[in-house]
Amino acid sequence: MAIRLVDWSKFVLVVLVGVVVISYFYHLRGNPKLHPATPRATQHAHQQYFVPKVVHVLWFYPEGTSLRFHQFISLLSVHKFLQPDEIVVWNSHAPEGPWWNAFLLRSPPVTLRHLDPPETVFDRPINITEHKADVARIQVLLRHGGIYLDLDVIILRSFDSLLKHDVTMGAESPDLLGSGLILSKADSTFLKLWLETYRNFTDGDWNRFSVRKPMEIAKAHPDLLHIEWFGFHRPNWFEREWIYSTGLLWDWSENFAMHLWYRTHDTEYEPESIRKLNSTLGEVFRFVFYGSGNIT
């Protein structure tokens, strides 16, 4: 009888241990605080963003064209402040030159993709290079989604808070919606409506389709996009002296980005010449290149 009693005690002990172990794992499985980094939680976090962190730029220049310093600063600002998953350079011929090589040395996630400038839109001819780029950016974003920017746009802080919107664009004025910086999910309704306006396109209307039409759509359908009224394109085209004039300094502390409108400015810069450049341009260049806008 004593032997049978010892065997029975061992059986009870094994059962009790099994119950404790099963209870522990059941508790662990049902308590999300004990395993916060589950695949489900990660997936949910990514679903908060409609716009992918992919940056698109266009390079419709002749073969052998070198990247300029201000364009290098633009790409560097993208790499530093947006930290994108990919920077896609849509090009008819790849960029060249020392500043392009300097950018590649920083190991950015760059992909070169060939794209010829569109010659027509809805069978209507496009002859002006800027208008070809206007159409191409809409087509690229419709298909892929992401962030488009002109290479004279300087990024000044993260866009993460804006990626939750289907589309984000910045106003140049109450009647003009800037097309130099666009955030959009793929296949967005706003971009579809915008592209449809090009059925009546003519090269003779310089900014009708690129900046006036999108603002008309935005006013008619305000639910389709988010507008940054001051954070993208201010100073605007008519306020360019606030960018380039000596001693005339714009408060850009709340800007997400700054559009330089550089085609009206023919000065070339390099790292040494921007050190003591007493202008908003100098501050922004130093902020991106040196990490501080202060004169050194």
Image: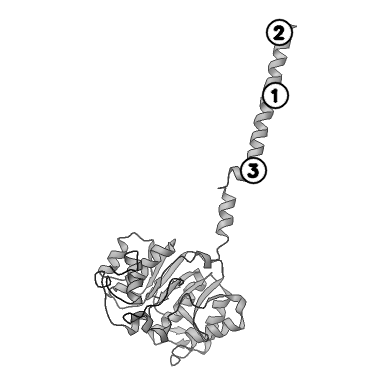
The earlier-in-sequence mark between 1 and 3 is 1
Tell me the residue at 66%/38% (across/down). Answer: 27
Q: Which residue is mark 2?
A: 3
The quarter of the image holding the C terminus is bottom left
- Secondary structure beneath dot 1 equals helix
The earlier-in-sequence mark between 1 and 2 is 2
In the image, residue 124 above or below residue 228: below
Q: Nearer the viewer, mark 1 or mark 3?
A: 3
Name the residue nearer the viewer: 129 or 98.
Answer: 98
Q: Which residue is mark 1?
A: 15
Q: Is residue 118 visible?
A: no
Q: Residues within 10 Å of mark 2 (few under 14, many from 20)?
A: few
Q: Position of residue 41 (x, y in %)?
A: 58, 52
Q: Which residue is mark 3?
A: 31
Which amino acid, mark 2?
A: Ile
**How many numbered dots are placed on residues in this image?**
3
- Give the colour scheme of this rendering: one colour
Tell me the residue at 47%/64% (across/down). Answer: 53
Q: Residues within 10 Å of mark 1 (few under 14, many from 20)?
A: few
Horizontally, is 35 left or right of 231 in the view? right
Which amino acid, mark 3?
A: Asn
Whole-angstrom CA distance, mark 1 to mark 3, is 24 Å
Tell me the residue at 58%/44% (across/down). Answer: 35
Q: Position of residue 87 (x, y in %)?
A: 41, 65
| Marks 1,3: beta carbons within 8 A | no
The earlier-in-sequence mark between 2 and 3 is 2
